[in-house]
Image (cartoon, rainbow, N blue to C red):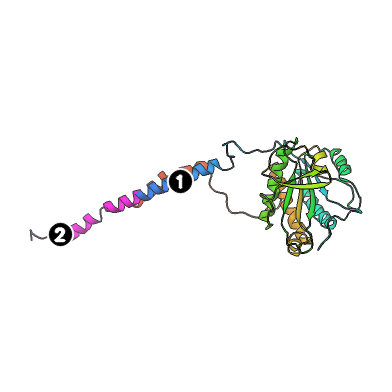
């Protein structure tokens, strides 16, 4: 009959395309996604820059193999701090494990501050022996301690202080060490696990790394007297049972040595050996650009 509509024709007309509300909703989603994408991209390109917008400092390292000196703190007749473990035993274990990792990596020539851990050598004597080997980086391994009854624990390290020739390189290395130890589960003490030490006569003054003023007082002898970037690292508190169990036991020393090795690799820009498998790398930036908001719009309208 002429007065009745064709139901099939009506259904086909309704199925011919999305409603206006659907299109508007999809466009709003696209706009929101586009805004989020560009904010993400801005954050991505800005990552790693300092407050002035400049590129962050990176050391100039040249080509491998790199000469890296490992100094085990104390030793010989000097036991260092005593607690759950003896500091000199812990530093020797960590040093041996770290030297083994460096020796296995063709990118490195590992060096020692002295021939034997049983040798007693003053910091000034060790500095002289280190300089004679012309290293490009020094790591001095130590353990921390606290008075009886203290619950102090965690990792901290001391780079060459502001105003010294190798301060920037040393601070950069300290950042790699602190990040590596934090990733291994250590609590970072102070400002990001990095501090400075100054001596006022016989009194040792601890200063947070936020204090960047240049001072006349000397820091640790080893840091002052070596001719290369240098960091002194306190891997854990020998007076803390929990700290020692995690970072001062035989297995703990191996964990710390691995973190230190990877920090050295990060400093020189080499790939650590036996790196655990990681998640697949993200698509190259050019590919991510192609798959940005326009790609999403294309997919949406293909679906429509």
* Residue for badge 1: 37
Q: Of discs 1 and 2, which sits in the foreground?
A: 1
Earlier residue among tags 1 and 2: 2
Label 1 crowd bin: few (<14), some (14–19), many (20+), radius 10 Å: some
Residue 261's x, y, as percent?
Answer: 74, 50
Residue 263 inside the magenta-drawn segment: no
Q: Secondary structure at mark 1?
A: helix
- Across the whole image, how many numbered discs are drawn on residues? 2
In the rendered image, the vertical position of residue 18 relative to residue 245, given as above or below: above
Measure the C-alpha gap from mark 1 to mark 2: 47 Å
Residue 162's x, y, as percent?
Answer: 72, 38
Label 2 crowd bin: few (<14), some (14–19), many (20+), radius 10 Å: few
Tell me: 119 left or right of 65.
right
Q: Secondary structure at mark 2?
A: loop
In the rendered image, the vertical position of residue 88 relative to residue 109, given as above or below: below
Look at 66% across and 38% down and name the residue there: 58
Residue 216's x, y, as percent?
Answer: 77, 37
Q: Are marks 1 and 2 in contact (CB under 8 Å)?
A: no
Residue 100 visible: no
Residue 8 inside the magenta-drawn segment: yes
Stretch of the chain drawn in magenta: 1-27
Residue 6 disc label: 2
Look at 42% across and 48% down and name the residue there: 33
Instruction: Say which quadrant the N terminus sits in.
Output: bottom left
């Amino acid at each position: 009959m002429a007065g009745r509509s064709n139901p099939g024709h009506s259904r086909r007309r309704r199925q011919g395309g999305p409603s206006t509300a659907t299109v508007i909703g999809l466009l709003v989603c696209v706009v929101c996604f586009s805004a989020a994408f560009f904010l993400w991209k801005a954050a991505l390109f800005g990552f790693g820059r300092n407050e002035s917008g400049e590129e962050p400092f990176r050391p100039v390292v040249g080509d491998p193999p790199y000469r890296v000196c490992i100094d085990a703190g104390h030793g010989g007749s000097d036991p260092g701090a005593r607690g759950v473990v003896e500091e000199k035993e812990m530093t020797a274990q960590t040093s041996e494990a770290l030297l083994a990792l460096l020796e296995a990596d063709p990118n490195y020539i590992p060096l020692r501050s002295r021939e034997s851990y049983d040798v007693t050598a003053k910091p000034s004597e060790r500095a002289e022996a280190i300089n004679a080997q012309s290293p490009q980086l020094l790591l001095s391994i130590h353990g921390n301690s606290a008075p009886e009854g203290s619950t102090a624990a965690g990792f901290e390290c001391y780079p060459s202080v502001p105003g010294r020739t190798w301060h920037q390189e040393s601070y950069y290395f300290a950042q790699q060490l602190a990040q590596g130890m934090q990733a291994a589960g250590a609590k970072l003490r102070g400002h990001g696990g990095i501090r400075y030490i100054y001596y006022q006569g016989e009194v040792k003054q601890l200063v947070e790394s936020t204090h960047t003023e240049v001072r006349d007082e000397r820091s640790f002898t080893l840091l002052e007297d070596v001719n290369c970037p240098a960091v002194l690292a306190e891997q854990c508190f020998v007076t803390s049972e929990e700290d020692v169990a995690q970072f001062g036991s035989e297995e703990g020393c191996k964990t710390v040595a691995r973190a230190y090795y990877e920090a050295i690799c990060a400093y020189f820009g080499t790939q650590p050996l036996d790196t655990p498998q990681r998640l697949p790398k993200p698509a190259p930036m050019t590919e991510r650009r192609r798959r940005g908001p326009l790609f999403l719009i294309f997919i949406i309208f293909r679906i429509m």
